[in-house]
Amino acid sequence: MGFYDLSKEERNQLVEKINQDITYDLASNETENIVKYFSDEDTYIRKTGYLAIGKIFYSRLELQKVILSTLTSLLKSNIDKVRQTVVNAAGEIGKFHFDKVQSFFDTGLFDDHHSVRNAVIGSVKKMGEKNPVPVLAWQKPI
């Protein structure tokens, strides 16, 4: 059943569960739930996952290093949806801390899968709207 097949109340409950599961994984140094949500076929489940990472990054400062190391590890996944969602999660962080996530875009820009490269483009656009100076300064030498 897709995200938008659920009632508004059920969606809100699912979002809360995803937030709790991802927080649990990060606090426990695990990735089982994160991978489950990041690889889901439903775009909106994946989006809820990467938005959760962004919220946790800003609300639980003690988990910031764990988040960055977890995302770094997951960027090496053989599942393209996981890599795509990692880039989107990095984009949420990069809205205000581009320097901490620039390497995700350096890597994702040259990913073999088009969805990961497209996630870089989408994230750069979102980050540029919030914090354009460091994003516009970012470039790959030719």
Image (cartoon, rainbow, N blue to C red):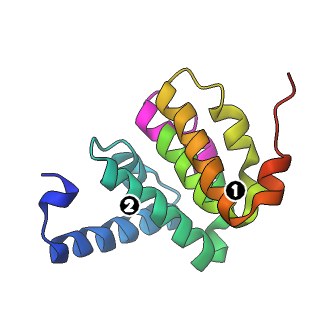
| Residue 48 badge | 2
In x, y percent, where is residue 50?
47, 57
Q: Determine the secondary structure under disc 1.
A: helix
Residue at the spot 32% in from the left edge and 74% down from the top edge: 16
Near-viewer residue (11 or 72): 11
| Residue 128 badge | 1
Report the magenta stretch's main SS: helix
| Residue 78 badge | none
Residue type indicated by callout 1: Gly
Residue bounds of the magenta highlight = 71-83
Residue 17 appears in the picture as rendered: yes
Vertical position of residue 73 compared to residue 132: above or below? above
Assess whether residue 119 is covered by the magenta stretch: no
In x, y percent, where is residue 91?
61, 54
Residue at the spot 70% in from the left edge and 56% down from the top edge: 128
Near-viewer residue (10 or 139): 139
Drawn side of residue 55 relative to residue 68, left or right:
left
Task: Count neighbours of disc 1 (C-alpha within 10 A) and say few if under 14, some if 14 to 19, many if 20 or more.
Answer: some
Assess whether residue 74 is covered by the magenta stretch: yes
Q: Quadrant of residue 109?
A: top right
Distance from the alpha carbon under mark 1 to that under mark 2: 21 Å
